[in-house]
Amino acid sequence: MIELHYWPTPNGHKITLFLEETGLPYTIKPVNIGKGEQFQPDFLAISPNNRMPAVVDTDPTGGGEPISVFESGAILQYLAEKTGRFLPTDLRGKYTVLEWLAWQVGGLGPMLGQNHHFNRYAPEKIPYAIDRYVNETRRLYGVLNKRLEGRDFIAGKDYSIADMAAYPWIVPYENQGMTLEDFPRVKAWFESIRARPATQRAYAIGEQIRGTFDLTTDENARKVLFGQGAKV
């Protein structure tokens, strides 16, 4: 059984996308990031960076004690290797997926996250910061659009964890100042993933858990999320 410590953010959605696609048994343990539940000692024991998602595999391959994994990219790779799904086993195919997974984790996610912050949540609208991250978002959409030329999915003809990692960050494209009509291959890719039954199930689960949580109006939640400093 996979215990998924989760909140319906783009990084959280990555993991439910995978679990719904594979049918791997799992249970969700919500971590309400607006209430600071990511700072609880039991969560920090499995996710020392105080970020969700994290998973605990109570039945790891080969047996033994449960294994915990934090960071969404590492979780996707772990689950793919556990199930033998959505990550090729041949050397070239595997590393094509992993390099695009790294592209998402190191570039697409952080840059679009800054776009969201300065566009929607920052108490002061700073034009330079907004322009900086909107322009970088546009550049990354262009990289993805070019990559999808002649391909159904990021790594080729098969859906993979690279697609699962990137898709949730494209979902709020309008909030990022983007239009998919400017990136036709991204649009076709996006719509094909959105139509998958597993994607629809994953997002329905997220909506049930989220409830009325809204960072744009919840000042206390913003203080929790954006007021963190070092804890020594």
Image (tube, helix red, strand yellow):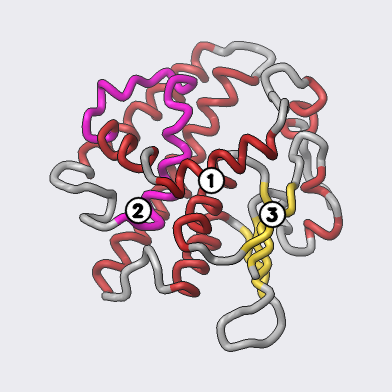
Residue 225 in sight: yes
- Residue at 49% of width from left, 20% of height from top? 175
Name the one closer to the observer, 224 or 23: 23
**Residue at horizontal 51 percent and vertical 49 percent from the top:** 14
**Amino acid carrying mark 3 in the image:** Ile
Q: Nearer the viewer, mark 1 or mark 2?
A: 1
From the top left corner, tell me how far across and down residue 187 is, in percent: 28, 31
Vertical relation: 97 (above or below) 200? below
Seen from the viewer's position, the closer of residues 172 and 136 is: 172
Residue receiving disc 3: 28
Q: Nearer the viewer, residue 232 or 66?
A: 66
First reached walking from the N terminus: tag 1 or tag 2: 2
Farthest left residue in view = 150
Q: Which mark is residue 142?
A: none
**Which segment is the magenta one?**
159-186
Is residue 132 at all visible to an observer of this figure?
no
Is residue 30 rendered to the left or right of residue 187? Answer: right
Secondary-structure class at tag 1 = helix
Q: Are marks 2 and 3 in contact (CB under 8 Å)?
A: no
Element under label 3? Answer: strand
Of callouts 1 and 3, the N-terminal one: 3
Residue at which label 2 appears: 100
Cα–Cα gap, marks 1 and 3: 12 Å
Whole-angstrom CA distance, mark 2 to mark 3, is: 27 Å
Instruction: Give the main secondary structure, helix, strand or loop, of the magenta stretch.
Output: helix
Q: Reply above or below: 134 against 50.
A: above
> Which x, y percent locates residue 148?
22, 43
Quarter of the image with the N terminus is bottom right
Q: Which residue is mark 1?
A: 202
Vertical position of residue 60 compared to residue 166: above or below: below
